Amino acid sequence: MSFDRSRAVLSAAALAAIALTLAACSQAKGGAGGMGPGGPTPVGVVVAKTEPVTLTSELTGRTSAYLVSEVRPQVGGIVKARLFQEGAYVRAGQPLYQIDPATFQAAYNSAAAGLAQAQATATAAKLKADRYKELVAINAVSKQDNDDAQAASLQAIANVAAQKAAVDNARINLGWTKVVSPISGRIGKSSVTPGALVTASQATALSTVQDLSKVYVDLTQSSADMLKLQAALNSGQLGRSGSAQVTLKLEDGSTYPIPGRLEFSDVTVDPTTGSVGLRATFDNPNGVLLPGMYVRAVLGKGVASNGMLIPQAAVSRDPKGNATVMVVGAKGAAEPRQIVTTQTVGDKWLVSSGLQPGDQVIVEGLQKVRPGAPVKPAVITAPAPAAQ
């Protein structure tokens, strides 16, 4: 029993000696590494500076056609033929539908015959009036007969004019049996087929033609943002950009290669949404933009002459939601700093207060430092993106 107790004591002493040896080796290795516990933590920083910053505003909107024309018949009848291919490009004046012209042709022929009859009657009345005018001068006919002849001639001339108007009306109706495109553009699907009965000025359009050489982008901006922008411009914080160009981002995230121009701003605030309508125009030579597309438009608001940008990766939020950053203090220690940010510019925040030019803002190594801990800053030229 005493032998077992002695062996247990020796084993415990051996384990203690091994632990002391490992601790000594660990301390020696830490010393050989160059920076022992409690030394400055290396961090990556960017130096805050002021510079002119072009500010933009990103608004959502939808595209609409530059010109839209709904094709409707001006006369009623049976559609004999459709003269276009759905989805094709049509030109202004190009025939689209043919309505049965038989009844309208007959009406035109009748009006033309009535005009010929009226012209013959007018010729006879004029000859009679001319003869009576000569005879009344020698008292061969009474003045009353001459007056009646002159009035009959004038009445016949008026009847000719009325018949000409009837012929013109019949010609117009006959021409309307061929329904033509009012504008040039892409035509959509047809709502009728040959054999369908259509009526004059019916509610349902036969088809729709849209001019897509240009498109409108209708945007909305809140009245509150508009007031903030006006206040910043009036106070001198922003200088006017002098450009009405608009950049468009498509639904797939790509940027439309052709810039547009802001053409219109509504003068009334929508009482239901509290927003103001804006409209931009974009050239669309390749037909990439189609009506109804959801897009995002980037508008230039102005230029902040003394803007300060810091990477989004450097900014965090405290429990109250205030933006904070870690800066390198005067004694080389990490120091938290509360800042005020106004908006994002790319992958950076625009800082309006809380930082001074020359402040070293920690961007890399934030997870390793604590307030008041010594740091070893190294300036980086390409800050890590916000996702990192």
Image (tube, rainbow, N blue to C red):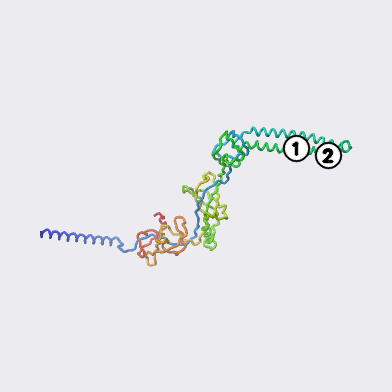
Q: Residue drawn 37% across and 67% down?
A: 331
Q: Quadrant of residue 180?
A: top right
Q: Quadrant of residue 386?
A: bottom left
Per the model, the C-alpha gap separating discs 1 and 2 is: 18 Å
Left or right? Give the position of 64 relative to 122: left
Q: Residue drawn 54% across and 40% down?
A: 188
Q: Position of residue 173 (x, y in %)?
A: 65, 37
**Could you classify mark 1 by the number of other residues whose Cα lies within 10 Å: few (under 14), some (14-19), or many (20 or more)?**
some
Label of residue 312 in the image: none
Q: Are marks 1 and 2 in contact (CB under 8 Å)?
A: no
Left or right? Give the position of 82 relative to 46: right
Mark 1 or mark 2: whose residue is earlier in sequence = 2
Q: Position of residue 299 (x, y in %)?
A: 52, 54
Quadrant of the rendering where the N terminus is positioned: bottom left
Disc 1 residue type? Asn
Q: Which residue matches tag 1? A: 159
Query: Is residue 30 shown above or below 252?
Result: below
Name of the residue lying farthest toward the bottom: 331
Name of the residue lying farthest toward the front: 144
Query: Is residue 164 shown above or below 371?
Result: above
Quadrant of the rendering where the C terminus is positioned: bottom left
Q: Position of residue 42 (x, y in %)?
A: 35, 61
Residue nearest the observer in this picture, 244 or 182? 182
The secondary structure type at the circle numbered 1 is helix
Q: Position of residue 244 (x, y in %)?
A: 55, 54
Residue nearest the observer in this picture, 373 or 280? 280
Left or right? Give the position of 383 relative to 170: left
Disc 2 residue type? Asp
Q: Which residue matches tag 2? A: 147
**Could you classify mark 2 by the number of other residues whose Cα lies within 10 Å: few (under 14), some (14-19), or many (20 or more)?**
some
The secondary structure type at the circle numbered 2 is helix
